[in-house]
Amino acid sequence: MAGIHCSINQPFRSQPVTVDWYKADTHMRHNIAEVKGERIKLQNINYTQNASLYIYKTQVEDSGVYFCKFNNTWGPGTQLIVIRSIDPLTAQYRTNMKDGLIIFQALLLAGVYCCYNATQTKTVGKE
């Protein structure tokens, strides 16, 4: 779960506060879209300048910059970066395979070098 909190320093006195949340690609608000969905939970209390956005079961696609909007006043953007998780056993297996391939390449290169060196030695010895 990811939680993003937003607050505005502008007092709204006694009027009810409406809060909307938006997601953009960058802090420049390019490709901005309203945040909604079944994994999204919004929390705000009327007459306050604080709001929260909760995203359950976060996915890589949830990465972006989230903005709150209090009664048509934009709040600061908060960047969310979601990385995919990886199983430690899978990571260790891949590391071992990579290391094995590096050793195999080194041995193969040494073999090619020895063969080349041996043919050069025979060529020089015949002269």
Image (tube, grey):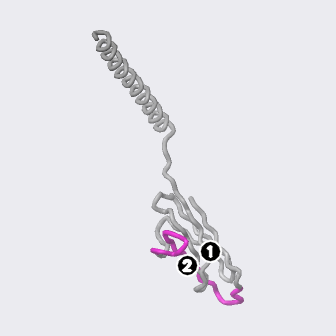
Span of residues in magenta: 11-31
Crowd around label 2: few <14 · some 14–19 · many ≥20 (10 Å): many
Callout 2 amino acid: Asp
Crowd around label 1: few <14 · some 14–19 · many ≥20 (10 Å): some
Which quadrant of the structure image shows residue 121? top left
Which quadrant of the structure image shows residue 101? top left
Q: Nearer the viewer, residue 63 or 95?
A: 95
Looking at the image, the residue that sits furthest to the front is 127
| Dot in front, 2 or 1 | 1
Residue 76's mark? 1
Measured along the vertical axis of the image, is residue 2 above or below residue 88? below
Callout 1 amino acid: Pro
* Mark pair 2, 1: CA separation: 13 Å
Horizontal arrangement in the rendering, residue 87 relative to residue 2 (left or right): left
Horizontal arrangement in the rendering, residue 3 relative to residue 30 (left or right): right
Measured along the vertical axis of the image, is residue 46 above or below residue 65? below
Please give the name of the residue rendered at 45% of the width and 61% of the height, measured from the top-left corner.
Answer: 61
Residue 116's mark? none
Horizontal arrangement in the rendering, residue 100 relative to residue 78 (left or right): left
The residue to which callout 2 is attached is 20
SS at mark 1? strand
- The question of residue 83 being in magenta is answered with no
Horizontal arrangement in the rendering, residue 23 relative to residue 106 (left or right): right
Q: Main secondary structure of the magenta part?
A: loop
Q: Nearer the viewer, residue 65 or 100?
A: 100
